[in-house]
């Protein structure tokens, strides 16, 4: 009797304690690479300063009464989080090559905890980067809604989005297994994900086929929610969060299932 | 952990990678509390056997038990009993030595109250106290090996699995590693399974050794008995090795050296 009661609790406790340990270790690692925050901020800065300011002048993208730079800023926020997260597929292959992954796999640790630790690291990086992008955008004159509740919502969206793309990337790494192939794949999927989303332009201007892609692209839901929370455009927040939670959960499960392939 | 079961029991284990038969109908018993040496030329199948034993590779045929627990069905329970030092150097270079060890203490549920002391204790025992707070990326090869031993020992494993623990180390460092293995074994009564190419090392340190060649055990006994079994001019374990593997080490050409060097 007591056994059947205790049985379901044990895996949950195990998962929680291992996830905590692995998140902690990721924080210890992140503490040592603070300089990267600056170098990683260069690309989003260029998008905002050059692309954003130029297209604001051109007025070719129909964004209603919202200035284009305001419209663009949440898209760049999502983009920079995407770039950070997609890197984790290469990172996990690097850890495999360094022998670190195999050793972790031989400890009594559920695969899901290993994957969640990486997703957490991606999220923390994405959040620090988001801070830089938000400050930069504000300096360029973007007027964000600074309601603390909204900012909390923004953080949640970025965490979920980063978790999804990090796990997507780990899944792809588990399929291709080689670092150079993974680099190619990272390059090959980042731009399609980005362009087949509403990050740069509203859905209404997309051709029909692109709209279809946009609808199955979690990045679009991420951008929609960020835009709704930060500059008050129309957003289906319930749907957006639903899609992000669902896709992050599925991605964690799939990545955990495929992780073992890396050490065979 | 079943009472009276040997530390390791392998029955009819086979493992192939595409055309390569790495392990071929292997039978092996490692008794409790012995230091057991698995010897063999490059490509003999030692690492593959160990990777099955440590649950990294699912056995393709045959059964493998660790203290009576089947590695296929009782994966988590088996992992709790094992401390593993893989062939390639594999401490996380971005973490300090202490953080590397503390992570493993958490992953093996060392109680919180003892974690700090146990971590410091094994770091001390491995002679790393002075370097403990430096990133492991700055360690020399010998220091990384000792750090890995500290990681493997912090959980007080019942079975310590070492895949060529002394490869690439200078003679002093090699002697240091063995000294620490003997010390810990004397204190805890753990079982040690070790692979090596160094005959004199096996003769000096192992209670029993098995010679493995092309996926099979060719001879198994105490080092002294193996040497004695070759009447006549045989003087040491090197000769025994040559006798059983022949001079045709074609299981170990260039290709295998390359595979062995690639970090896993
Ligand atoms: N992941 C792999 N994919 C394909 N072949 C492999 C793989 N791992 C090992 N092999 C092959 O299996 C055989 C046994 O390799 P294994 O690494 O078990 O040998 P070993 O005894 O540990 O050798 P070494 O002393 O060089 O470490 C070799 O022929 C090797 O090329
Ligand atoms: Mg080997």
Image (cartoon, rainbow, N blue to C red):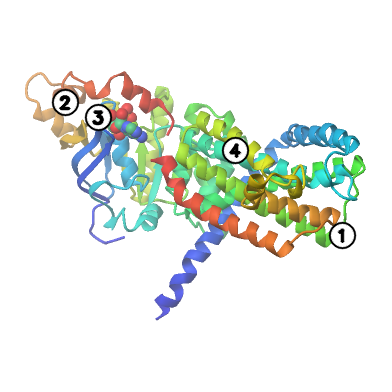
Quarter of the image that includes the N terminus of chain B: bottom left
Nearer mark to the viewer, of 3 and 4: 4
Q: Give B15 or A63, whichever is nearer the viewer.
A: A63
Q: Chain of mark 1?
A: A
Q: Please tell me which residue lies in front, B25 or B189.
A: B25
Q: Which residue is mark 1?
A: A147
Is B119 situated left or right of B215 in this image?
right
Q: Which residue is mark 4?
A: A189
* Picture quadrant of residue B72: bottom left
Q: Is residue A19 left or right of residue B74?
A: right
Q: Which mark is residue B157?
A: none
Residue under label 2, please give it. Answer: B240
In percent of the image, x 73 and y 37: which residue is there? A34
Task: Determine which residue is flagged by label 3.
Answer: B40
Residue B256 x, y percent position in the rendering: 32, 24
* Residue B243 position in % (x across, y down): 14, 23
């Amino acid at each position: 009797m007591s056994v059947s009661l205790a049985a379901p609790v044990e895996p949950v406790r195990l998962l929680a304690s291992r996830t905590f340990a692995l998140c902690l270790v990721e924080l210890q690692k992140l503490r040592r690479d603070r300089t990267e925050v600056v170098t990683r901020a260069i690309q989003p800065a260029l998008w905002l300063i050059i692309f954003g300011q130029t297209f604001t002048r051109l007025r070719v993208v129909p964004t209603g009464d919202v200035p284009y730079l305001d419209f663009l800023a949440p898209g760049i926020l999502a983009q920079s989080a995407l770039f950070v997260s997609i890197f984790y597929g290469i990172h996990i292959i690097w850890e495999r090559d360094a022998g670190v992954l195999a050793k972790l796999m031989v400890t009594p640790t559920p695969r899901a905890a290993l994957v969640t630790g990486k997703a957490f690291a991606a999220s923390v990086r994405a959040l620090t980067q988001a801070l830089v992008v938000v400050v930069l955008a504000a300096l360029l004159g973007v007027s964000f809604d600074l309601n603390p509740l909204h900012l909390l919502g923004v953080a949640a969206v970025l965490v979920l989005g980063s978790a999804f793309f990090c796990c997507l990337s780990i899944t792809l790494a588990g399929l291709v297994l080689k670092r150079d192939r993974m680099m190619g794949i990272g390059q090959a999927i980042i731009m399609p994900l980005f362009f087949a989303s509403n990050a740069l332009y509203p859905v209404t201007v997309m051709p029909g086929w692109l709209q279809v892609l946009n609808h199955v692209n979690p990045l679009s839901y991420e951008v929609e929610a960020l835009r709704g929370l930060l500059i008050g455009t129309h957003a289906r927040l319930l749907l957006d969060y639903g899609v992000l939670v669902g896709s992050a959960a599925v991605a964690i499960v799939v990545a955990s299932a495929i992780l073992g392939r890396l050490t065979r | 952990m079943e009472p009276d079961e040997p530390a390791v029991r392998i029955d009819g284990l086979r493992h192939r990678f595409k055309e390569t038969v790495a392990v071929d109908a292997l039978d092996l018993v490692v008794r409790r509390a012995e230091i057991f040496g698995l010897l063999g030329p490059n490509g003999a199948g030692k690492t593959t056997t160990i990777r099955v034993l440590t649950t990294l590779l699912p056995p393709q045929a045959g059964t493998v038990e660790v203290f009576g627990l089947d590695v296929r069905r009782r994966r988590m329970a088996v992992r709790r009993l094992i401390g593993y030092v893989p062939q390639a150097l594999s401490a996380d270079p971005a973490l300090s030595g202490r953080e590397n060890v503390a992570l493993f203490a958490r992953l093996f549920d060392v109680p919180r109250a003892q974690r700090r002391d146990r971590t410091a204790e094994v770091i001390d025992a491995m002679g790393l106290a002075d370097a403990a707070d430096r990133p492991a990326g700055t360690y020399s090869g010998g220091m990384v090996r000792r750090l890995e031993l500290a990681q493997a020992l912090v959980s007080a494993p019942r079975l310590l699995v070492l895949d060529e623990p002394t490869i690439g180390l200078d003679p002093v460092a090699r002697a240091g590693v063995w000294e620490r293995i003997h010390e810990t074994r004397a204190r805890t009564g753990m079982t040690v399974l070790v692979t090596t190419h160094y005959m004199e090392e096996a003769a000096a340190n192992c209670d029993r050794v098995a010679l493995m060649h092309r996926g099979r055990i060719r001879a198994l006994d105490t080092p002294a008995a193996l040497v004695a079994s070759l009447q006549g001019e045989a003087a040491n374990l090197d000769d025994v090795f040559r006798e059983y593997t022949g001079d045709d080490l074609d299981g170990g050409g260039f290709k295998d050296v390359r595979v062995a060097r690639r970090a896993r």
